[in-house]
Structure formats: structure tokens, C-alpha cells
Amino acid sequence: MPDAVSTGPAGRPAMGRLELVIQERGGRSIASRQFHQGALRVMRPHYLDDSGQVCYVMVNPGGAYLGADLYTVDVEVGPGARLLLTTQSATKIYRTPGSFAEQRMKLNLGDGAQLELAPDQLIAYREASYRQDTHITVRPSSTLVMAEVVTPGWAPDGSSFKYEELRLRNEIHVSTAPGEELLALDNLLIRPPLGDVTGMGFMEGFSHLGSLIVVDRRVDQALADELHALTAGYEAHTGVSLTAQQSGTRGLVLRSLSNSTGELNHLLGACTGLLRGRWRGQEPLNLRKY
């Protein structure tokens, strides 16, 4: 990653870098290291309840990703620590002539660590091309919950679904004493102009996509069935997949298709709310942003 960050006229790539290390101290989770460079930073931490889970809000002052922009995010959650990471607003991908915009994220969870990733929706506008690569390392006793919604932006002619390409890749490894084992490799490619979608989801006439990824030793078929049943009351088409078990832990991927951002947010909120209450005795998330 270059040391210099471009801050020139509009249209120049504005790269951003964020590093965050969370440790447990006396029953509360705190940041032992924070570093930001360029157009990425976090707001002051706050605690939504008395569980000790710290909440950080990631901010992009530039407001949007443009062509050739590269953003890197490295997050480490130490043993026993709890982190909720969200964003201040939607991630907007505007026109990317010449080259795609990209986000690279590394997530590392220690023994007994808990990470809840709940960004606002990703919005891709006309002629946008975007790649998101997330590399995740967990321990068998870690808990990971990631929820995300992808929506199309509106074109000037009033139509939607005009972006060029979205590539979303999640690679999850389980770290044990002998080394690392691959738990899941989740690839999603969406090319609306070609009507071509591959991966674990398929658009089939829908315009919005919701994803939930859960890794925990308590994940099993009964939980997958319960989450799938929970989604039945929403105007969305949903499927759930389980990974094979590795070193005592397992992954779950839920994909939901709809034509409404709000509907998917409510659906994913119900699923994460169930997990928060059952596993950690916490209330459903209520992130109020103005």
C-alpha cells in the first residue's frame, strides 16, 4: 500500500486504509490499535448495551467509490473480545471508467472472539464495476456474523440495475495449532447487462440481494432450518446452505432475493436478532443513524 494518499482534484483515485485491533479489558472490549490513512476512518467507540461489545462506525468522508479507488480494511478481534462494526451510510459505487473500484478486507478472530459486521447497503450505480475481497480467519471457538445488502442505483432515465459488474468474494479459514483449514470459499458475480449471475445466489428477475454469513460451533442443520422458516414471512426468496464441519466449527450462508432494500434489512435483522438473543442474550440491533 503506498504511503502517499491522493487528495487531488475530483476524479483522481482516493485510496483509504483502516486498521483496527480490539482487545478485551476487564469485561469490556476496547481498541488497542487504531490507524487510518486517506478516505477511511472510524468514529469514537460506543456501547449499545452492558454486554461489553464495542461498536465502531466506519466512515468514508469522500462519500463514494470511484474508478481505480482501492480501500483496505484490516480488523483483528483478540481472544474474548467483542466487536460490532458498521458504516455511517451506504457504500456507493459510481461510474468506474477505465478500472473497477475495490475493497480488500482482512478479518482475524481470536479464541472466543465475536465479530458482528453490519454495514449499510452497497449501492452500485450506472456503469459501476466493483470488487470486494474479504479474507477471514477464525478459531474454532470464534463467532462471526456478517450481513450485507446489495441494491442497484437509479440511472438518469429512471431505470435501475444498470451497473456493469459486482464481484463479491469471501474466503474463510479456521486456524488451529497444526495450521489453517479452508472452511468456505464464497464467490458471487453479478453482471446485469448480460443477465449473468453465478455463485450461491441467483437473481431470477429480482433486483436486490441480501446475504448473511455465520460461523460458529453451534451452527447446524436445525439452525439453518429455523432461519429459513423465519424468512418465510417476508417478500423475498431465500435459500440457506451449510459448510462441512472443520475443527469443530461450521459456516452458514443465507441468500435472499427481493425488490426492496427495506424488506431485506428487516429480514436480515430478524435473523441476526435471533442469534444475538440466543447466543449472547442481547437485544436485536437498532442502529439509528441520522
Image (tube, helix red, strand yellow):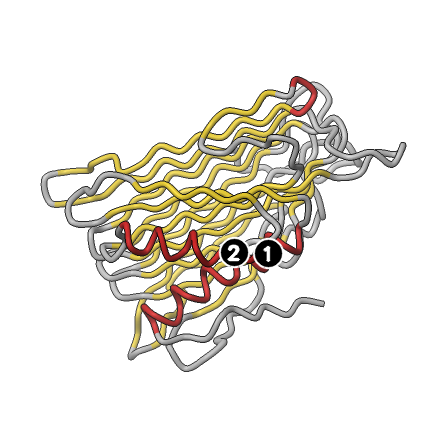
The front one of 96 and 22 is 96
- Badge 1 element: helix
Image location of residue 23, percent across then percent down: 32, 65
Q: As shown in the figure, which amino acid type bears the numbered disc 2?
A: Leu
Give the residue furthest to the bottom.
50
Image location of residue 263, percent across then percent down: 63, 54
Give the residue furthest to the left.
178
Mark 2 packing: few (<14 Cα in 10 Å), some, or many (20+)? many
Image location of residue 128, percent across then percent down: 70, 29
Height in image: 244 above or below 265? Answer: above
- Badge 2 element: helix
Q: Residue at x 77, y 35 (%)?
A: 160
Height in image: 274 above or below 105? Answer: below
Q: Quadrant of residue 145?
A: bottom left
* 180 sits left or right of 74 in the view: left
The quadrant of the image that shows the C terminus is bottom right
* 88 sits left or right of 252 in the view: right
Residue linked to disc 1? 265
* 24 sits left or right of 233 in the view: left
Q: Residue at x 55, y 45 (%)?
A: 210
- Please tell me the numbered disc located at residue 288: none
Dot 1 and dot 2 residues touching (CB under 8 Å)? yes
The front one of 76 and 147 is 147
Image location of residue 250, percent across then percent down: 25, 47
Q: Residue at x 66, y 17 (%)?
A: 194
Residue linked to disc 2? 268
